[in-house]
Amino acid sequence: MTATASAANQPQASALSANRSFVLRGILLAVVVGAFMSLGNVNIGAIGQGLGYALAGVTVFMTFRVLGFVDLTVDGAFPIGGAACAILIVNGHSPEYAMLMGFIAGALTGMATALIDIIFKIEGLLASIIVITAAYTVTLHVMEGKSNIPLLGQETLISRYSKAFRTWLVEQFGDQMRRQSTNLLEIILFGFIVFIVLAILYWFLRSEIGLAIRATGKNPQMVRATGLNHNLMIIIGLMSANGLAGVAGSLVVQQFGFADVSLGFGLIVRGLAAVIIGEVLLRPRSVGQLLIAAVTGMLVFDISRAWIFSALDLPTTDIQFVSALVVLAALGAPRLYDRWKTYKQRLGG
């Protein structure tokens, strides 16, 4: 009886230990990143920008890790979602409604990739390339033929609360906080939105449909054998994932104050880097931890890039080059570490 009870408690104890380790790594990472930001004089705006792009990292996690689908559609869903949000705001709609339409626009982009893959039996990589090629023209049409739509003077999530929040901040903490009021507001608003989305996604991935989508990525043969519609799971998975990219695009256009047709250029690489950074630094085990790791990875990416700019005093024209270096470090460091461990084992043997 005692041995049976002990064996039954082992998985629970293991899960508790894994959760404790995850939390401790998160706290340590927050302290280290905070120290780097302080020493490198990095503006807290990097946190807000990371939160704006965070859901794009979750998109990449959903497609690559959950569905096991090589998908580049995020590069098209992101600007389409942002464009839909911007044009609706300019035409007098509320930011909340515009963001919902941004989600739907991104989801439809994901559905297009899924249907091309299913109907024409074209591999996911090529199917998504076809979609993002067409997405450029679709984005232009959504933006009524313009390559750029400014949001100056329009009511966005940020502008709606900006004046009141700035006044409150100055009254409570002094005039020195005036310059950081917009950055702090972005962190609060975007952090709240990301938290709500992650909570909904966590619930969804643990539902019956969510479990079927996860099983589709792990073992599609088993899914077919159980009578589930494998193709439907791919469609739902890609739609939900790229819908999040559309929401991220909606947040970023409100943060930047404009929508641009080329806003999502290279986002897939940034998303992959975010997923890998989060997994390497936090070593997540559960679905909830993996979602948090994807968001954390995007935050670390943006803060690292801002730190490099601040430390080296680089011009803004070098932003793509610096981004490439951060991505290279994120993708290459784990492989170099594995090779170094293998080399040490050989020497020891």
Image (cartoon, rainbow, N blue to C red):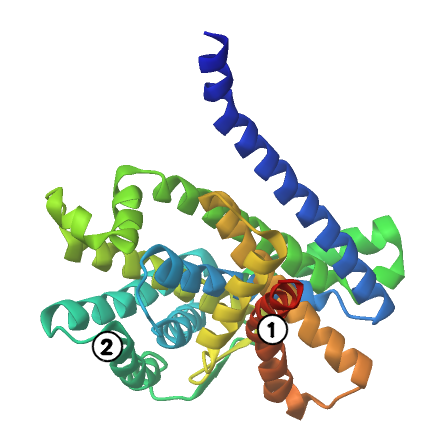
- For residue 336, the mark is 1
Q: Quadrant of the C terminus?
A: bottom right
The quarter of the picture where residue 110 lies is: bottom left
| x and y percentages locating residue 218 in the rendered image | 30, 52
| x and y percentages locating residue 216 in the rendered image | 25, 52
Q: Nearer the viewer, residue 143 or 326?
A: 326
Q: Amino acid at mark 1?
A: Leu
**Crowding near the residue tagged with mark 1, few <14, some 14–19, many ≥20 C-alpha atoms within 10 Å:** few
Say which residue appears at 65% left-offset and 68% top-offset: 347
Q: Amino acid at mark 2?
A: Ala
Q: With 29 as the anchor, is 258 left or right in this view?
A: left
| x and y percentages locating residue 109 in the rendered image | 28, 70
Q: Is residue 175 visible?
A: yes
Say which residue appears at 67% left-offset and 49% top-offset: 26
N-term-proximal mark, 1 vs 2: 2
Say which residue appears at 70% left-offset and 64% top-offset: 182
Q: Is residue 229 above or below residue 313?
A: above
Q: Is residue 111 above or below residue 208?
A: below
Q: Is residue 155 visible?
A: no
Between the C-alphas of marks 1 and 2, the distance is 32 Å
Q: Nearer the viewer, residue 180 or 313?
A: 313
Q: With 194 as the anchor, is 141 left or right in this view?
A: left
